[in-house]
Image: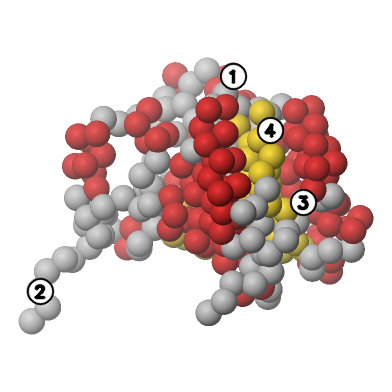
Amino acid sequence: MEITGIEGKTALVTGSSKGIGRAAALVLAQAGANVVVNHRDSEREALEVKSQIEKIGRRALVVQADAGDPDALHTMFDKAIETFGGVDIAVHNALYTKREFAKDLDWRDWKRAFEVGVDGGFIVGVRTAEDLVRRGAPGSITYISSVMARSCPPRSINYNTAKNAIRGLAYSLAAEYVDKNIRVNVIQPGWIDTPGERKFATEEEIREGATRMPLGRLGKPEEIANVVLFLASDLASYVTGVTIRVNMGTQLGRNPARREIK
């Protein structure tokens, strides 16, 4: 089935120099979008993404902006509108987490998770939606959450809570802009093989953990990006205010039966 509704549009993806954000930027470019590539402190990787997008034949703009800094986000949107005329597709992927028990978590780390995920997500959502309204154009906003918003494991209270708040943010925006044909949705990835995972686990721990997954492996960033593409495309023209879990059924159990059925 042909993917339509992306060609000639502009996509803005926060945290798109690595991992899921990078994969989303490239998949959207392959479908015909020009892309605003955002990073906080990874310019080299962001420029690599830009180069790949340009090889595809699309345009790319690299913008350094901390997703937890409102002024930086507004400046990024101003640059995107100046360069491309507007933003049609937004993907808020940037995140912050600190792995500590609640009793040990520094207040600044608690606040930082909300500044990046929720406050930044609010600005991304409203700026995108209002730009679409200004142009009388339909559009799509997608928030990358996590299955941890549901499972809420220990030592991730700031991340778990912020990702839960993102759902409320997305659904509220979906309700407010549905009559403008602006769709807002949430993706909850499972355990995905990204560079960020290496901050919290060794390669051996990741390999061992992967054996407990239903398919015996972690998810790939591209598998999340494909759902981003679906939600941004005309295939999802009647989809708004929903959460899609992309986790190969890990909510069914960490080690579901993988045995011969007699």
Q: Position of residue 148 (x, y in %)?
A: 44, 46
Judge from the rendering whether residue 192 lies leftward or rightward of residue 20; answer left or right.
left
Q: Position of residue 94 (x, y in %)?
A: 58, 38
Which numbered disc flags the more N-terminal residue, 3 or 4? 4
Q: What type is the residue that disc 4 sits on?
A: Val
Q: CA distance from mark 1 to mark 4?
A: 25 Å
**Residue at the image position 56 percent from the left and 34 percent from the top:** 46
Mark 1: secondary structure: helix
Judge from the rendering whether residue 139 lies leftward or rightward of residue 146; answer left or right.
right
Local packing at callout 1 (Cα closer than 10 Å; few below 14, some 14-19, many 20+) is: few
Local packing at callout 3 (Cα closer than 10 Å; few below 14, some 14-19, many 20+) is: many
**Residue at the image position 73 percent from the left and 43 percent from the top:** 124
Q: CA distance from mark 1 to mark 3?
A: 32 Å
- Mark whose residue sits in front, 1 or 3: 3
Q: CA distance from mark 2 to mark 4?
A: 51 Å
Which numbered disc flags the more N-terminal residue, 1 or 3? 3
Q: Position of residue 194 (x, y in %)?
A: 40, 41
Q: Residue 31 sits in which quadrant?
A: bottom right
Identify which residue, 171 or 16, lies in the foreground.
Answer: 16
Q: Which residue is mark 1?
A: 108
Labels 3 & 4 near each other (Cβ < 8 A) = no
